[in-house]
Amino acid sequence: MSSLSRLHASVLVGGGSVLRSMFSTWYNTLITLVLLFLAYKAVPPLAGWLVFDAVWSSPSAQACRMAGGACWAFIREKVRFILFGFFPYAEQWRPFVAVLLLIGLVFVSANRRYWKPWLLGLWPLAIAAVLAVMGGGFAGMTSVPTAQWGGLPLTLLLAVVGSAFAFPLGTLLALGRTSDMPLIRSLCIGYIEFVRGVPLITVLFMASVMLPLFMPAGIEIDAVLRALVGMTLFVAAYFAEVIRGGLLAMPKGQFEAVHALGLGYWAGMRLVVLPQVLRISVPPLTNTLIGLIKDSSLVAIIGLVDLLGASKRSLSDPEWLGFYREAYVFVAFIYFVICFSVSRYSRSIEAQLSARQNH
Amino acid sequence: MKVFLATLLVTTALCSAAEAGETLDRIKARGSLVCGVSEGIAGFSAPDSTGKWAGMDVDFCHALSAAVLGDADKVTFKALTAQNRFTALQSGEVDVLSRVTTYTLTRDTALGLDFGAILFYDGQGFMVPAKLNITSAKELDGATVCMQTGTTNELNVADFFRSIGKPFSPLAIEDVNELNNAFFSSGRCDVYTGDTSGLAAWRSSLAKSKEDYVILPELISKEPLAAAVRHGDQQFGDIVRWVGFALIEAEEKGISQANADEMKTSADPTVQALLGVSPGNGKALGLDEAWALNVVKAVGNYGEIFERNVGAKTPLGLQRGTNALWNKGGLIYAPPAR
C-alpha cells in the first residue's frame, strides 16, 4: 500500500520523478527496458491489426480476407445479431428499449440521492416493464418466447435481475448464519457451504442436462428462468458471505446499543446494523457483482444465446466465416465497458462513504 | 461421470420410448415443430445476419414443417451442442434432431433413436499443410491431430492409428473456432481431422491460399448424416424418413420449387403419387395428401437444397460427389413413393 501511494505521489509530482523511479535501481532499469522492448514488439503490430490495416466497411468477406488487419466490416454486418441475438429482426427496437430500461434502472439506483423507499418499488416496476417489452403479446407487439431472447439484453437481465433477487436472499442468509437459533443457523451454513462448494457451471449443467431427464416428456421449464434461478441461488451464497463479513466487522457496541435502545431484532438490524454493514460491504459486493456479470456468459451451457453466445453464433454464417478474433475483441470491449463502469462506480461510492465517515 | 451419464441416458431412453402418434399430435397441438439444430455449422445450420437460420439441416426442418403443418415457417429452432443433442431429443425438448448426426448402430439401438433418410454422405478425412509433403495418411507418424470433442471423430482417429500401428497425440477442442485457430493460425497441431465436407469448407474460407493445405485421400470413416427421432413413435419416424425420400424423389423426377404446381399435370404415375394427384400416400403417413407438394414448394428438391446451402456457388463450394443422385454416380437414392 505504501509503495502504491508513493507511486501515486510521484505521478502527482510530475513526469520527472516517474522517469527517475523507472530507472532508480539496476533491477528497475532492467524491468523498464524489458517492458519497453515488449511494448515495442507488441504495440505496432497490434495497432496495425486493430486500426491501420483494418477494413472498416466492405460488402463481402472476400475483401476483408485479403487485408492484413481486422475486419470490422464483419462487426458492422453482425452487430445487431451480436447485440440482440435471435430476436425478430423487424422488432429489435424492443430489446433496445429493454437495455435502456435496465441501464437506466441501474443508473438511478446508483445515485445516492435516490436511495429512498420508492426506489424499492421502482425495481419490480422496471423489471416488469423490461419483461413486458421483451415478451410482447400486446399493443401490436408480437409475442416473442424467451428462447428468442438473446444478446446484451439477456446478459444484463441475468445480471441485474439475478443480483436484485440474490441481494435480499443473501442478506437473509447472512443474518441466518449469524443467528442464535441453531436450526436456522445450520440450514444457512449448509446451504452456503454447499453452493460455494460447487462451480456455477455444474449448477447450470445439472439444470440443462439432468433436469429434463427427470421431467415428464413435454414438460419443460423455461430456459431463461432456469438460468436466472440457478444464478440467483448461486450468487446469493456469495453475497451472504460478503455481508456476513460486514456483520462480523461491526463493533460489538453497535449491537449493544440496539439492545440498550430497546429495539427488536429486525428493527435494530434494519435501522442500525445493516446500513453500516452494507456500507462497508460495497467493495466486495461490487467484486461479486462483476463476477456475476461475467459468469452470466456460462448460460451458453444451457443453450441460451447471451452476448458471448450470440457473437459465437455469428461466426458460423457461411458468407462470413473465420472472423472470430474481431467478434471476441468486440464482445470483450462491451464486457470491459460494463465491468469497468461498475468498478469505477464502486470506487466513487467508497470515496463518498469514507468522506462521510471521516467528517 | 461419462459412464454414469451414458447409463442414465440409456435407462431413460428405454423407459421413455415414445408412443406411436404421440409426437405428431403434440406438434399439431402446439402448432409448431421444434427442430434441434447445431449451434452453428456453416452450410448445415447457421444464423444469418438477421438471426434467420439457414443451411441444409434447417431446410429439412422447414420441409418437415411444410409436410406436417402445411406451413414451412412453423419451426422453432433449438440450438444443441454435440453433447446435449441426444438428451434434448430423448427428453422431448425437440421433436426431431436435424443436426449433422451420423447414423450408427449404437445410436439407433442403445440411445433409443430412429433415423430418417440419409441426406448427406460424409466421411472423416485428414487435412495437412502442403509444406509437409505428405501424400497419404499412412505416413503420419507421431503427429498431433486436432479434432472436435463429442463426435465420432475421436474414436475413428484412435482406431485408425491403432490399425496402422503408429503413435499420435490427439488435441480435442470443443469450440470449432478455437479448433480452426489451432490448426490454421497457431500451428498447435500438424493434422486436422474431421468430416471432409467441413475440412473443405474451412480450407476455402480460412486458408490464405487453398493450395497451402491438402486433404489426404484416405477416408477413415463413413459418416452418413440423417435426421433422428425418438425410437418408438414409428409414425413420426416414417414421416421424417419419407419427407427425406420425397426431396430425393423430387430431384430425380425433375420436380423443383418453380415447377412443382405444373408437375401436378404430369402423366408419370410416380409423380402423381408423390404430389398427391393420385391420393393414398398422405393417408398412409397420416398427413395431408399435398404433403410432398408442400415440401417441394417450400424448400425445393434435394438438389436445390444442396446447391443453395453447400454447393459449388456457395462459400463452402462442395461438389455433389457421393451426394449426387444414384443415377448420376452418387449414393443418394430413395425407395419408390407409392
Image (cartoon, coloured by chain):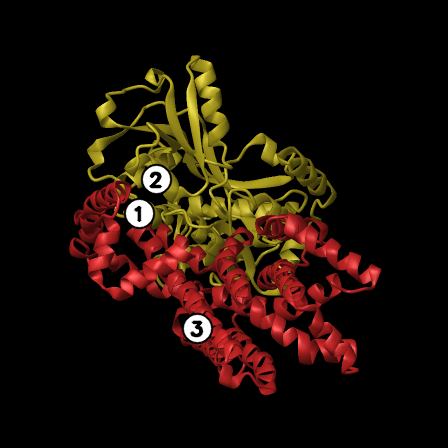
Q: Is residue A165 above or below residue B286?
A: below
Work out whether residue A173 or residue A301 is closer to the camera in this orientation and state it: A173
Q: Which mark is residue B310?
A: none
Disc 2 + disc 1, Cβ < 8 Å: yes
Q: Which residue corresponds to mark 1?
A: A322
Q: 10 Å neighbourhood of mark 2: few (<14), some, or many (≥20)?
A: many
Query: The residue under label 1 is which amino acid type?
Result: Gly
What residue is drawn where x is 32% and y is 24%? B217
Subunit that carries the residue with mark 2:
B
Q: Color of chain A here?
A: red
Looking at the rendered structure, the secondary structure element under dot 3 is helix
Q: Which residue corresponds to mark 3?
A: A348
Disc 2 + disc 3, Cβ < 8 Å: no
Looking at the rendered structure, the secondary structure element under dot 1 is loop
Label 2 – label 3 distance at C-alpha = 44 Å
The answer as to whether the residues below labels 2 and 1 share one chain is no
Q: 10 Å neighbourhood of mark 1: few (<14), some, or many (≥20)?
A: many
Label 3 – label 1 distance at C-alpha = 41 Å
The answer as to whether the residues below labels 2 and 3 share one chain is no
What residue is drawn where x is 27% and y is 47%? B315
Q: Which residue corresponds to mark 2?
A: B180
Q: Dividing the image into 4 quarters, which one contains the N terminus of chain A? A: bottom left
Q: Color of chain B here?
A: yellow
Looking at the rendered structure, the secondary structure element under dot 2 is helix
**Residue B312 appears in the picture as rendered:** no
Query: The residue under label 2 is which amino acid type?
Result: Asn
Q: Position of residue A184 (x, y in %)?
A: 80, 62
Q: Earlier in the sequence, mark 3 or mark 1?
A: 1
Query: The residue under label 3 is which amino acid type?
Result: Ser
Q: Is residue A245 above or below residue A92?
A: above
For marks 2 and 3, give the one nearer the viewer. Answer: 3
**Residue B334 appears in the picture as rendered:** yes
